[in-house]
Image: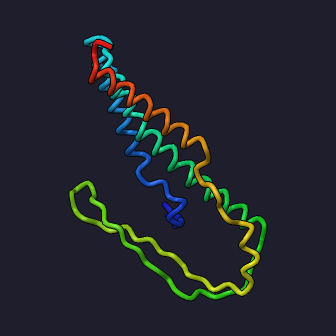
Amino acid sequence: MFKRKIRPAQEEMTGVLYSALFLLIWYAGLLRGILTSGFQSSYMLFLAAGLIPLFTAVQTVRRALFYRRQREEIKAAGNVSRGRIVNVIMKSSPYEDSHHRTRYRRYYFLEAEVADPGIFEENRVFDEYGTGALVCKVLVIIAMLFMLFHILFPGS
């Protein structure tokens, strides 16, 4: 029997499968166009634009795996503190399913009052994406600006 595991919102990898499917179709269409009519410089813009969903999917997976590893490390450390749950906050976000009906995805957050807050200070997250994300974004922007320049000024 299939057992559903409930994960916190930070550990979810929603939309990665759809992004991968979109990228497969995107690059297959570009490859078909390149093979039938030959390579043209305008294809560079579309090849670079296809990197954006790829980058987003990779960052989503990296973030989810980071939070899953962090949760496992915290569980392994065994830092248990006395406290009590003060409030449960529910956040609903609408989305459209495959039959074009509006559905709601619900996220639950526990608000806890911890008796010894000093234990949790060492487990703060300072940088969840790292510097690789910034470098990739800058490279995509430079490639897109280069292609835009060649589209606007074709003789240059």
The residue lying at 42 percent from left, 45 percent from top is 17
Residue at the spot 44% in from the left edge and 47% down from the top edge: 16
Task: Give x and y (percent) for residue 82.
Answer: 72, 86
Q: Quadrant of residue 135?
A: top right
The figure's colour scheme reads rainbow
Depth order, front residue of 99/27? 27
Residue at the spot 59% in from the left edge and 41% down from the top edge = 132
Q: How many marks?
A: 0
Of 152 and 76, the residue lying toward us = 152
Residue 105, above or below 97: below
Q: Nearer the viewer, residue 125 or 88?
A: 125
**Residue 151: x %, y % from top left:** 28, 22
Q: Quadrant of residue 26?
A: top left
Query: Residue 156, how many percent across, how many down?
Result: 33, 14
Position of residue 80 relative to residue 26, above or below, is below
Query: Would residue 27 be found to the left or right of residue 96 on screen?
Result: right
Figure check: 76 above or below 137: below
Residue drawn at point x = 65 percent, y = 59 percent: 126
Front position in the image: 141 or 55: 141
Q: Which quadrant of the view contains residue 92?
A: bottom left
Seen in the picture, residue 63 relative to 92 is either above or below; the reply is above
Q: Kindly give the residue lying farthest to the left in the view shown.
A: 100
